[in-house]
Amino acid sequence: MFIIPDNFARFIEVQHGTNGLAWLARLPSILATCEQRWHLKIGIPFSNLSYHYAAPAVRDDGTPVVVKVFSPTGEFALQTEALHLFAGRGSVRLLGDDPDNEVQLLERLEPGILLSTLKNDEQAISIAASVMCQLWHPAPSDSAFPSVLKWGAGLVRLRRYYDGGTGPFPVRLVEEAETLFAELSTSMATQVLLHGDLHQDNVLSNGHESWLAIDPKGLIGEPAYEVGPILHNPLPQLLMEPQPGRILARRVDQLSKELGFERARVRGWGIYQAVLASWWGVEDTGRLWDEALQCAELLAAIKL
């Protein structure tokens, strides 16, 4: 008997409708196939499930692993290719995959502490910067990975959705994000394969002061683009701090120094991606991600 949490099932139904319900109906048989194919026993799923099903498992020889079953988001192929290319450098290792059922067999990171749980934010940002440097891989010439330019269409869709306006988004902030994207995207440095979603809940400890990334999106762009998610996360915890604006300013300075990027570029990509993330909230759930928008405001207030 496999455990499929009710809140996860409801989320999948909301996200995917009848396709989601059909996938949920197939999920137990997919998990049973995983147990037979890879000679393992699947345990209780992780408590923070969102878009996909993931659970710890143990192989017959005692090796701890993770089984990740992708819901119908279309992300399986690119995430799997990204893990192949990263090959364990800064990322979790891919041990096997089942394209027919869109399943990944992954190494289990232990103790698996989330970077977001570290109390020392300066230390956490330094760890994230180190992971970034390990991850970046020369951009493959023949892949289907999206580019930063393609993701930039998000703000075009925002304008279209609000009939040329910005709806509940502050006009000034959207205009600044649009201007920054136009400037930054046309002056990018050498482009590489990025993680694409490197925030504090996607970096886990693997013992011996080692930290690795999970759940790469796979994106082609300049290295400086990678800083966006780590700047405006974790939310809402960041905004509950006494002076979140000071934290963001220090993060901009720290990432600029440790990664060798221009301070204006780090801040600029941070503003743009926080606005974009808030818009994705509208696309995914029907409401903007207000906390990300607040971070964009705070980043925009940082003086250069």
Image (spheres, rainbow, N blue to C red):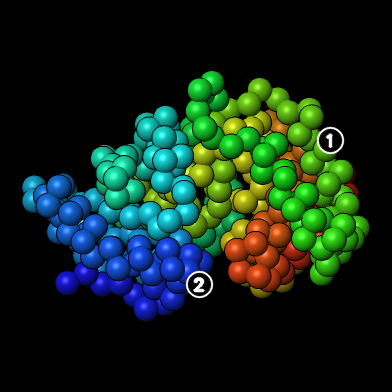
Q: Which image quadrant for residue 208?
A: top left
Q: Which residue is found at the position 38% from the left and 32% from the top? A: 84
Q: Quadrant of the C terminus?
A: top right
Disc ID at residue 14: 2
- Quick check: 160 above or below 186? below
Disc ID at residue 73: none
The location of residue 158, given as percent across then percent down, is 77, 57
Is 20 positioned to the left or the right of 181 in the image?
left
- Quick check: 282 above or below 112? below
The location of residue 55, given as percent across then percent down, is 29, 61
Residue 252, visible in the rendered structure: no
The location of residue 63, given as percent across then percent down, is 16, 48
- Quick check: 112 above or below 97? below
Disc ID at residue 183: 1
**Which is more toward the observer, 86 or 281?**
281
Q: Are marks 2 and 1 in contact (CB under 8 Å)?
A: no
Q: Which residue is found at the position 29% from the left and 50% from the top? A: 101
The location of residue 41, given as percent across then percent down, is 15, 59
User: Which amino acid, mark 1?
Assistant: Glu
Residue 226, visible in the rendered structure: yes
- Quick check: 20 above or below 300? below
**Which is more toward the observer, 50 or 226?**
50
- Viewer-side label of 2, 1: 2
Q: Which image quadrant for residue 42?
A: bottom left
Q: Secondary structure at mark 2?
A: helix
Badge 2 crowding class, 10 Å Cα cut-off, few under 14, some 14 to 19, many 20 or more, is some
Q: Secondary structure at mark 1?
A: helix
Query: Which numbered disc flags the more N-terminal residue, 2 or 1?
Result: 2
Give the Cα distance between marks 2 and 1.
37 Å
User: As drawn, which residue projects farthest toward the right?
Assistant: 172
User: Which amino acid, mark 2?
Assistant: Val
